[in-house]
Amino acid sequence: MTDLTSVSVLVLGAGGLGCEMLKNLALQGIPTVHVVDMDTIELTNLNRQFLFTEKDVGRAKVEVAAEYINSREIVGAGGQLVKVTPHFQDLTLFTRDFLAQFTFVISGLDSVEARRHVNAELVKITLESQFQKCIPFIDGASEGFKGHCKVIIPGFSACYECSLNTLPAKTETYPLCTVANNPRKPEHLIEYALMVQWPQTFPDVSFDYENPDHLHWLTEQSIDRAQSYAIDASALTPNFILGVIKNIVPSVVSTNAIIAGQCCIAMTRLLYDLYDFENSPNFSIFNGEEGAFSHSYLHSRDPNCLICGDNKQTL
């Protein structure tokens, strides 16, 4: 495929990775882009999510991102203006017919469960069409100075479910871009208290999780916030809070740019038939903690995968 005029892309997430992906797709001239996210803009997002400014704090990320790109009137393929359509909603509410309209789905999500949901839906679209329709799913993730890009061809290559064993033992981390205005988990409360409230209250004091007074303060702030948002505070024990603190990983703008670039390059290779389904690497990892290291390899399908495996059963 080389004609971009009919290409449409669904971007999952409008945070650090999503902003980079939207910019790349717009400058590449993809005329039809949709983006879904249910987060609002926080002041702490502005150092790495460059589509937003201070005046946008409190607004939906997808709406501001779409306005920013659409206002530039970027001329895309065939002379069409690039148009970004925002969806401020839970992506699991999308129907399968809605997903089936896109040429590609590119993910910059934090949530493993959301990725698994989209992966399962895209595999079902391929199988139900008897392989007449296949929507590649390109998954990007960043965590501090590390990240990965997975290229998933539903029904042909390893799906996201096949690669769950490549994730760290603890698959859920709590990146800095968790939204403060719409917390949904106890973890979000703790992160907000540590990353936003602590610097505001004690600007010259570093948080020390081994200090009982610091931990007590964090616990009280989290419980107070839980009451404001009707979140069950019973999980907010000292041991739970310590576990969350040790898994908060700051988002690094350079890592986001690298991973988003890898994802868009993968999409471009598919567009121009430069991807060998059987031999091309479908999993790339990047590690910038000590220098810069990148490695790509072919991850094979799991024949016993519950989503795309040969032996799956419908219950």
Image (spheres, grey):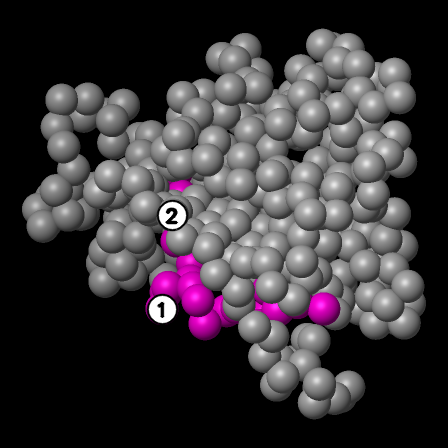
Quadrant of the snapshot with the N terminus: top right
- Nearest the viewer among 23 and 215 is 23
Majority secondary structure of magenta residues: loop
For this rendering, which residue is in front, 168 or 301? 301
Q: Is residue 166 above or below residue 315?
A: above
- Please give left or right for residue 198 compared with residue 176 in the image: left
Q: Is residue 178 magenta?
A: no
Q: Secondary structure at mark 1?
A: loop
Q: Which mark is residue 169?
A: 1
Q: Is residue 88 visible?
A: no
What residue does disc 2 label? 294
Q: Quadrant of the C terminus?
A: bottom right
* Residue 191 on image: x %, y %: 35, 42
Q: Is residue 158 magenta?
A: yes
The amino acid type, in three-letter code, at marker 2 is Ser
What residue appears at the point 56 percent right and 23 percent down from the top-left corner?
Answer: 58
